[in-house]
Every structure is written in C-alpha cells, then in structure tokens.
C-alpha cells in the first residue's frame, strides 16, 4: 500500500507559477511511476505528467514547456512545477502512483489549482 499527501495548490493569476508536492509513504520501494493528473469541472480526468523510476519523464502536449515534473527519491516526493499558468489549467490536480508487482494504482486526495484571467 502507498499513501499520498498532496500540497501546494491555490489561486494564481494567469502567467504565474505554482509548485505542487506529493509525498508518498508506505511501500515506496515498490513505486514504478509517479505522476499528476487533473480534472476540471465537467471534464474527465486527464494525464498531465509522469516520471518513471529511472527518471524518464512524459508530459501532456498542453503543458509541455510550461510544467516540469521532478522527484526527490530520498523524500519519496514528486513535484510539479507549473509556470506560465493559464486559466484553462484550472482543475483539481491529483497525484498518481503505480506501485507493486501487480502495478496497483494509487491516488492522492486532490489539490485545487485556480488560475484567474
């Protein structure tokens, strides 16, 4: 089992920056992949970014060049640095982890990001 605690959401003006954090605990040695998804009102949850255990990263086209995902292995924490934020980035952001031999999915509780125009 993996437990996830997110922090760092908030209200920011367009063009501003935020950094989200997600601290993992529990069976952290079994983590294969950490990442972020987001869900805006009325929309489905969508992929934002991910980082594999080896450090390979992947981003949604909509955030490439603006968002950066990173991981502190010692702290078992994944970060999402969000620059040049746009109103369409407004959503609840969820931390996501894949862990274990059976590649179980774990989700954080979500943190609200609101970008005003």
Image: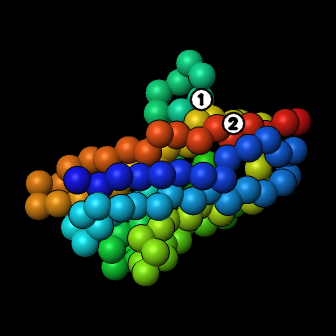
| Residue in the picture at 62% in, 56% down | 20
The residue nearer to you, when weighing 93 against 23, is: 23
> Left or right of 46: which side holds 8?
right
User: Whole-percent x and y of residue 59?
Assistant: 51, 58
> Left or right of 74: which side holds 54?
left
Q: CA distance from mark 2 to mark 1?
A: 7 Å
Determine if residue 21 is in view. Answer: yes
Instruction: Please tell me whether mark 2 sits on a helix, a strand or a loop.
Output: loop
Question: Which mark, by number, is residue 106?
Answer: none
Disc 2 packing (10 Å; few <14; some 14–19; many ≥20) = many
Total marks placed: 2
Answer with the quarter of the image where residue 88 lies.
top right
The residue nearer to you, when weighing 75 against 30, is: 75
From the image, tell me which residue sits under label 1.
Answer: 40
> Left or right of 63: which side holds 75?
left
User: Whole-percent x and y of residue 79?
Assistant: 56, 64
The residue nearer to you, when weighing 84 against 70, is: 70
Q: Is residue 39 above or below residue 84?
A: above
Q: Is residue 97 above or below residue 54?
A: above
Determine if residue 98 is in view. Answer: no
| Residue in the picture at 46% in, 75% down | 75
Instruction: Please tell me whether mark 1 sits on a helix, a strand or a loop.
Output: loop
User: Whole-percent x and y of residue 104?
Assistant: 20, 50
* Label whose residue precedes the other's in the sequence (2 or 1): 1
From the image, tell me which residue sits under label 2.
Answer: 90
| Residue in the picture at 49% in, 65% down | 78
| Residue in the picture at 46% in, 33% down | 45
Q: Residue furthest front?
A: 26
Label 2–label 1 contact, CB within 8 A: yes
The residue nearer to you, when weighing 25 against 48, is: 25
User: Whole-percent x and y of residue 41?
Assistant: 60, 22
């Amino acid at each position: 089992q993996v437990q996830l605690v997110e922090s760092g959401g908030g209200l920011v003006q367009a063009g501003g920056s935020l950094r989200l954090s997600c601290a993992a605990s529990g069976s952290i040695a079994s983590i294969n992949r950490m990442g972020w998804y987001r869900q805006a009102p009325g929309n489905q949850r969508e992929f934002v970014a991910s980082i594999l255990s080896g450090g390979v990263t992947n981003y949604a086209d909509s955030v490439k060049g603006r968002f950066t995902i990173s991981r502190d292995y010692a702290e078992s924490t994944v970060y999402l640095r969000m620059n040049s934020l746009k109103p369409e980035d407004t959503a609840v952001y969820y931390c996501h982890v894949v862990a274990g031999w059976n590649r179980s999915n774990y989700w954080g509780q979500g943190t609200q990001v609101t970008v005003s125009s």
